[in-house]
Image (cartoon, rainbow, N blue to C red):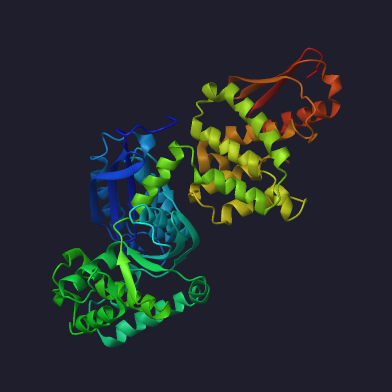
Amino acid sequence: MSDFLIDEELLAAIDMGSNSFHLAIARVDHGEVKKVASMSEKVQLAAGLDENKNLTEAAQQRGLACLARFVGRLSSVQPNRLRIVATNALRQAKNGHEFIQKAAEILPKPIEIIAGREEARLIYLGVSHTMANGGRRLVVDIGGGSTEFIIGEEFEPIYTESLQMGCVAYTTAYFSDGEITQKSFDKAVVAARKELSAIATTYKMEGWDTVVGSSGTIKACRQIMVNMGLSDEQENVTREGLYKLKDKLLKFKNVSEIDFEGLREDRRAVLPAGLAILYAVFEVLEIDRLAYSDGALREGVMYDLLGRFKHEDIRDRSVQALMGRYNADPKQAERVVKTAQQLFNGVAKSLNLTSEDSDLLRRSAYLHEIGLAISHGGYHRHGAYLLQHSDIPGFSQIDQNHLSHLVAHHRRKLRNDVKNEILKAGGHKLLYLSLLLRLAVLLNHSRSDQMLPAIELTIINDQQWQLSVSGDAKQWPLLVADLHDEQEQFKHWDIELNIQSEKFID
């Protein structure tokens, strides 16, 4: 992967939202992302979740057809400059892995299912880069399955939350027959108010200077209000204008009758639910005025990707934050990182490992001891749990799953059945990285800066590795014993670890 992007290179992002899928292609111009092409299709993935939270075949086919059309526009974008993120619908879908496997046959990059707070962080990044700085801001993004709330200053989010309420989900729950009544609208508002009660006190105490909305629901409501003269002079959504829009909406008996100027046909069915959520947001958070930003998740994804190329990767900041939070030993982590990178560099070509694999190994080496904050017994399992279930900025659910596996298996016994879990989660690459981390940790069991013997790892074939140790192995009796034990563990994953030294008897 290139270390930097020149101005003429392209970036792209696919945002697989619960209501719509979006594609954005942009050119980097003096550090800013300038959109040059975009596509958007209403897929309504969330509406395709059945009573058991499984995506129906019809919903999957809608999504796959849309992605196939998007791919047709990506011929000029290199795969390493593309990110594909999925949000609430695939977070909720129990059979989401089936859809992802089908999509993998179409897409040039894997889909990243991102957690709610990570979605909120990326939305804020997109909004903050498309608006002038105006002190502390509250950003509200009403999606198809969830609504994100972020308080931040300049480009840094301070609070991020994702609540389970969205225009598609609420349409299914309260307006499924298309009828619009005061009763159904009030039920949707009450449900939204209950969701908002979880964050209202904290957010209002934190405070903000301005409020900004993003994405389709707020865009549609604002455009209707502008066309009807219900917005203020700056074309902001106001509380008074929102109440008047609600009254006008309730005059319609069915969504098929809605004829507001500027409302797209594909937005009509979800407007009552979206407006109910926005209405509740204004009431509970006591908002008087809300501006609109064209920046949203896909723009944030591209700025985040740009940061990775410019060595401003939020994932590395998150790793350091986790180490600090759980008081991991930084010196030991650096020792293991150094050894892991040395081992990786020696075998990367033979094992077809990439720079992304190197990053994953390095981050797992930094984090392998965070479980010690809970207890020493089984700390590898504690660390794995923390990595699997925490909200970690910059990481997708798949990223966290891979980190969790590496930390879980960096010590103690390896079981054959676990090998199958590793292969299912990340293929042979994840298995190889697990073994490299084990060796790096083992070689630093002394937890000292004392010079280790010179080591070299080579790959004989897929099932035979060779670790060469220079010098007299009798100087490191504990290391010798550990390596003998590790040979037995490698066999459980069908890898023969040969150890060679001038004075080492294998």
Q: Residue at (66%, 42%) from the top-left corner?
A: 409
Q: In the rendered image, which quarter contains the C terminus?
A: top right
Total marks drawn? Answer: 0
| Residue 350 drawn above or below residue 374 | above
Left/right placement of residue 35 relative to residue 469 reads left
- Compared to residue 368, the image places residue 55 above or below, namely below
Q: Quadrant of residue 94?
A: bottom left
Q: Is residue 44 visible?
A: yes
Residue 500: percent from left, percent from top: 73, 17
- The picture quadrant where one finds residue 334 is top right
Query: As drawn, which residue projects farthest toward the bottom?
Result: 183
The percent position of residue 397, horizontal first and vertical second, equals 49, 51
Look at the image and tell me in which quarter the N terminus lies. Answer: top left
Can residue 428 be seen? no
Choose between 227 and 421: the one closer to the eye. Answer: 227
Q: Residue at x 58, y 24 (%)?
A: 345
Residue appearing at x 58%, y 44% in the figure: 403
Give 24 or 457, whichever is nearer the viewer.
24
Residue 53 x %, y % = 41, 64
x, y (%) of residue 26? Answer: 29, 42
